[in-house]
């Protein structure tokens, strides 16, 4: 409606302007003829004396009607004037008023009259029939009015067509959004016409952005469902064991003392494992770090603390730490507790796959942290999945753990805008590289 109204306003404005210009030009031609007639009348009056020029207005030539009017009514001739004489005509004769044009009627016909001054204290009136000019004005009014009306209709039709065509992606976007809201299925997409992906108009960009948002939503929903399925699968075994040991403890009076101690210890260990698994799942469900918890952290000091803790937890494995001089005292924004968990997961993973007596090498520079073990390394087919949730390589399925440590490490790295990669270390083992 707005586009149509704007186009219609322009069309009507052009027609009105054209009518005014045409009307002005038609009357301008008549006015030029009247001015020439007034000049001829003045010349005749000077040659023939101050006689009054009058007679029948036959409109056959210029001037068709002409007369000279004195300043004083007492000087008027005895015969009646053909053209109307008003006070304004006397004022022009006296020089008190400028010459002027006026539309009048003479003997039932439309005419155009011009009144100007005369050098003998009189005014000259000339008139020409204006039927042709008025007919032209009327025809122009009807023609331009019709064109204006047609322009309004065409503007409305074109505005409707352009609006429907331009807003078609918005209609599809609305339908897709309603469908996603009703079905909660983010697999729907807005269909874009061929070649529209290369356009830069706002509607296409909106549709493309909405499709991108649906892609992200679908990936998020898929990851959430996979996490729930994997968590359910991982929790099934320890919960079953917990239930079995709990049922055994119900009949503790029938069990020998040593058996009762073993069941109690197993129950505590299983509760600890389940608690750790649930905590890890809660950490993985967090999409980003809370900004108010960010603070400037000494990463070198945090690394030393993590290595000291790992030495206590893994006494059978050696830890060799090297900190470059450019890494000392460097403060980085982050959450100390989360960064400490990241380092702990990397060190625990390296120690878990290291044979007894082996050494885990930890190096820190201003831009990079490396953790290298001397274990079996990571197989080529396991490299693409090493950071997936609950993924455990065939060689690691007999070892303790839930398969969430490296997935959690990658999430912490991403939320801190860093990068974590794994490589086969020269000479065997795995090399984890954290780019700060």
Image (spheres, rainbow, N blue to C red):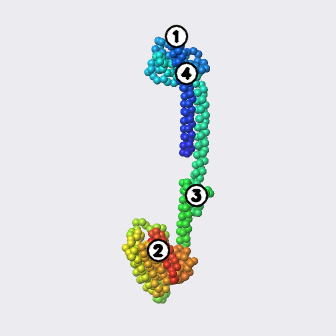
Could you give the CA–CA distance between mark 4 and mark 2, rounded to whole angstroms?
A: 102 Å
Q: Residue at x 49, y 73 (%)?
A: 420
Could you give the CA–CA distance between mark 3 and mark 2, rounded to whole angstroms?
A: 38 Å
The numbered mark, 4 or 2, whose residue comes first in the sequence reads 4
Res. 434 mark: 2
Q: Residue furthest top?
A: 78
**Disc nearest the viewer among 1 and 4:** 4
Residue 290 quadrant: bottom left
User: Is residue 420 visible in the rendered structure shown here?
Assistant: yes
Res. 37 mark: 4
Could you give the CA–CA distance between mark 3 and mark 1, rounded to whole angstroms?
A: 89 Å
The numbered mark, 1 or 4, whose residue comes first in the sequence reads 4
The residue nearer to you, when weighing 355 against 321, is: 321
Q: Residue at x 58, y 37 (%)?
A: 148
The residue nearer to you, when weighing 152 against 179, is: 152
Mark 4 and mark 2 residues within 8 Å of each other at the beta carbon:
no
Question: Which corner quadrant holds the C terminus?
Answer: bottom left
The residue nearer to you, when weighing 261 against 97, is: 97
Image spot of residue 101 (x, y percent)? 51, 24
Image spot of residue 277 (x, y percent)? 48, 76
Mark 3 and mark 2 residues within 8 Å of each other at the beta carbon:
no
State the residue position of label 1. Answer: 78
Mark 3 and mark 1 residues within 8 Å of each other at the beta carbon:
no
Image spot of residue 297 (x, y percent)? 39, 71
**Disc nearest the viewer among 4 and 2:** 4
**Disc 1 residue crowd, few under 14, some 14–19, many 20+, Cα 10 Å:** few
Q: Secondary structure at mark 4?
A: helix
Q: Secondary structure at mark 3?
A: helix
State the residue position of label 3. Answer: 198
């Amino acid at each position: 409606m707005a586009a149509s109204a704007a186009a219609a306003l322009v069309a009507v404005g052009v027609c009105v302007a054209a009518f005014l210009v045409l009307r002005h030009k038609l009357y301008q031609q008549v006015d030029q003829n009247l001015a020439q007639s007034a000049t001829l009348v003045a010349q005749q009056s000077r040659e023939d004396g101050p006689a009054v020029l009058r007679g029948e207005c036959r409109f056959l030539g210029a001037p068709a009607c002409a007369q000279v009017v004195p300043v004083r009514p007492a000087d008027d001739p005895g015969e009646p004037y053909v053209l109307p004489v008003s006070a304004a005509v006397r004022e022009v004769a006296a020089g008190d008023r400028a010459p002027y044009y006026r539309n009048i009627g003479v003997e039932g016909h439309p005419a155009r009259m011009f009144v100007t001054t005369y050098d003998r204290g009189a005014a000259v009136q000339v008139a020409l029939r204006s039927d042709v000019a008025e007919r032209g004005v009327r025809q122009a009014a009807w023609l331009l009015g019709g064109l204006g009306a047609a322009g309004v209709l065409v503007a409305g039709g074109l505005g409707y067509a352009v609006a429907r065509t331009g807003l078609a992606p918005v209609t599809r976007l609305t339908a897709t959004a309603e469908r996603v809201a009703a079905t909660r299925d983010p697999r729907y997409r807005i269909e874009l016409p061929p070649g529209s992906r290369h356009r830069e108009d706002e509607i296409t960009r909106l549709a493309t952005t909405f499709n991108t948002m649906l892609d992200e939503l679908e990936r998020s929903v898929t990851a959430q469902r996979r996490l729930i399925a994997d968590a359910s699968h991982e929790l099934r075994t320890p919960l079953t064991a917990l239930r079995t040991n709990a049922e055994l403890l119900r009949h503790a009076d029938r069990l020998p003392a040593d058996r009762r101690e073993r069941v109690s210890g197993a129950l505590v260990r299983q509760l600890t494992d389940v608690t750790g698994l649930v905590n890890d799942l809660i950490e993985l469900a967090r999409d980003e770090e809370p900004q108010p918890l960010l603070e400037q952290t000494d990463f070198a000091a945090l690394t030393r603390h993590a290595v000291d803790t790992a030495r206590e937890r893994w006494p059978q494995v050696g830890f060799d730490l090297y900190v470059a001089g450019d890494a000392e005292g460097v403060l980085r924004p982050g959450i100390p507790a989360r960064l400490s968990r990241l380092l702990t997961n990397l060190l625990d993973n390296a120690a878990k796959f290291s044979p007894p007596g082996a050494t885990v090498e930890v190096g820190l520079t201003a831009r990079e942290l490396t953790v290298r073990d001397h274990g079996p390394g990571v197989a080529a087919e396991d490299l693409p999945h090493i950071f997936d949730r609950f993924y455990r390589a065939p060689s690691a399925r007999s070892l303790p753990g839930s398969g969430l440590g490296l997935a959690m490490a990658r999430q912490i790295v991403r939320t801190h805008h860093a990068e974590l990669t794994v490589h086969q270390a020269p000479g065997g083992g795995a090399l984890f590289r954290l780019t700060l």
